[in-house]
Structures are given as C-alpha cells and as structure tokens.
Amino acid sequence: MLRIENLHKQFGDLAAVDGLNLQVGRGETVVMMGPSGCGKSTTIRTVNRLVEPDRGRIMFGDIDITKLNADELMAVRKKIGFVFQQFNLIHRLTALENVMLGLVMDGMPREIARAKAGAALIKVGLDKHFQHKPGEMSGGQQQRVGIARALAFEPELMLWDEPTASLDPILVREVLVVMEELAKYRASTMLVVTHELSFALHVADRIVLMNKGRVVEEGVPTQVFVKPQSSIGEQYKELIEYQMNTSALTLAGKRIA
C-alpha cells in the first residue's frame, strides 16, 4: 500500500527526516510515536506532499508520489484522507456543508455529495448535528467533522497528524473512539501520528518509534512496549508502568476510603 524509501527533509541546519524507511500494508493500522520534534509530523505530511521531501521515494501502490505533477498529485490526494491537528472548518457552513464542500468542488453532483457527506457524519456519530455550525459544537465534535470530511472521499489511506493534540483531555476520548472503530472495521489503511498511548496499545497493528528523524524501533505493541530494544522504547515502557502503578494506587486508595 505505502512504501517510504530513504526519505530526507532538511529545514535549515535541522535534518527533520533523515533517511527514513517505512512500509504500511493494506488494511494495517500503523502508529508513529516519539518525542516532540523527532520528525513524525514532517514524515506524514510528505506522504501527500503537504511538505515537499528533499529526496527519497514515496510509493503509493505503484505510484511514486514524489514524481507527480500538480494535476496528478491532486488526483492521488483524493485517495488519501488527512486529518489535521487543527479542525480547519469553515465557520459559516454547517457540518454537512463542510463535509460536502470538497466533494462538490471536485465536480460531484450536490445530491450525491450530500448523501456521501451525511453517511460520513453518521459514521463518526454526528447524525444529529448535520445543521450545526462549528461554533455550536464542541472541539471533539468539530474534529469528528474533520474526520468525516476525510472519510467522505472513501480514501484508501488515512493519515492522522496528532488529531487529538488541540483538544481538552475530556474531549480526547470521543475522537479516539471514532478512530478505534475505523481501525476495527478496517475502513481504510491508517498511518497515525499520536502521543495517545491507550490508542496505540489497543488499536495499532504495529508501532513505529522515531527519534531525530529516523525509525529507531518498530514492531507489535507487546514487543515494543514490553521488551523494547531502543532507549525511546524504554522510556515508553517506563511511562506505561508508571501509569499502571498510579492507577493501581488510586484504586487501592478508593477501596480503603
């Protein structure tokens, strides 16, 4: 489905992505994790060339995305959904209109676009919010509109760039539930950049750990987080153990009380 080979991206003196190699199989959910600034978001944004790579190949099926001209790239982007950190909704439009917009601009008849947009909103649990504008919805609901907007194109590949990063902690769960459902039913192949350990543990087929622009470890969650082979993996293992111990102490305290 997706194969990244020897990818490089430099910003001034900073090597944001430094010879990265990655493969994602059809129907697979791959989660990319690592410290802030390690190159995760830059990597995922090169896949549909929101960031132009300096060199390397990005193969989507048998298509080298790095070789496409502007028209060819636009055609391929219709097959690749992208969910951003920010919601990027148009505030004067309703949820339904926000999801329809890209379809209509792509030449789809309005009634067909309306039906597809409605189906996508239902899929993310917003069947009662078709006519709500962004200002009338919570942050979690707005992000779900953004997810529906991507799903409406029925993409083969979904890219997620820290989709919960802009949300208050109390709203994070509602977005993660939608992502988990999509992963469960293999609606599309998913490459996810996130700091959400619970999502990675429960949903990922494979974890990819990055540091300083490179992949330092990858494998199934039980391998990477239980018997890590990298210093980054060790840090995640310690964090998971700390969170488990904290939860256990909290539960014990409640029983005593």
Image (cartoon, rainbow, N blue to C red):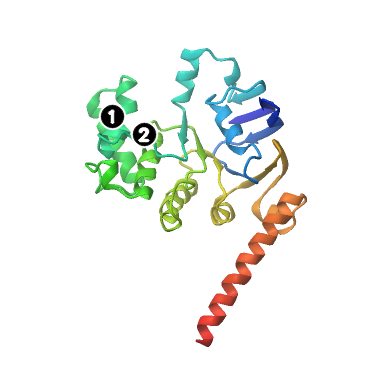
User: Residue 90: which quarter of the image?
Assistant: top left
Left or right of 212 in this view: 246: left
- Looking at the picture, how far across and down is residue 106, in whole percent? 34, 21
Residues at circles 2 and 1 in contact by the CB criterion of under 8 Å: yes
Element type at marker 1?
A: helix
Q: Report the Cα–Cα distance between label 2 and label 1.
A: 8 Å
- Looking at the picture, how far across and down is residue 189, in whole percent? 52, 38
Q: Quick check: 108 above or below 136? A: above
- Looking at the picture, how far across and down is residue 225, in whole percent? 68, 56
Left or right of 138 in this view: 224: right
Residue drawn at x 61%, y 32% as measured from the top left: 43
Query: Residue pushed farthest front?
Result: 13
Element type at marker 2?
A: loop
User: Residue 67: which quarter of the image?
Assistant: top right
- Number of other residues with Cα within 10 Å of mark 2, as a class: few under 14, some 14 to 19, many 20 or more: many
Q: Which quarter of the figure is the N terminus placed in?
A: top right
Query: Mark 1 or mark 2, which is nearer the start of the sequence?
Result: 1
Q: Amino acid at mark 2?
A: Ala
Q: Amino acid at mark 1?
A: Ala
Residue identifier under label 1:
113
Query: Residue pushed farthest bottom?
Result: 256
- Looking at the picture, how far across and down is residue 110, in whole percent? 24, 26
Residue identifier under label 2:
152
Q: Quick check: 43 above or below 36? A: above
Of 202 and 252, nearer the camera is 252
- Number of other residues with Cα within 10 Å of mark 1, as a class: few under 14, some 14 to 19, many 20 or more: many
Of 79 and 214, nearer the camera is 214
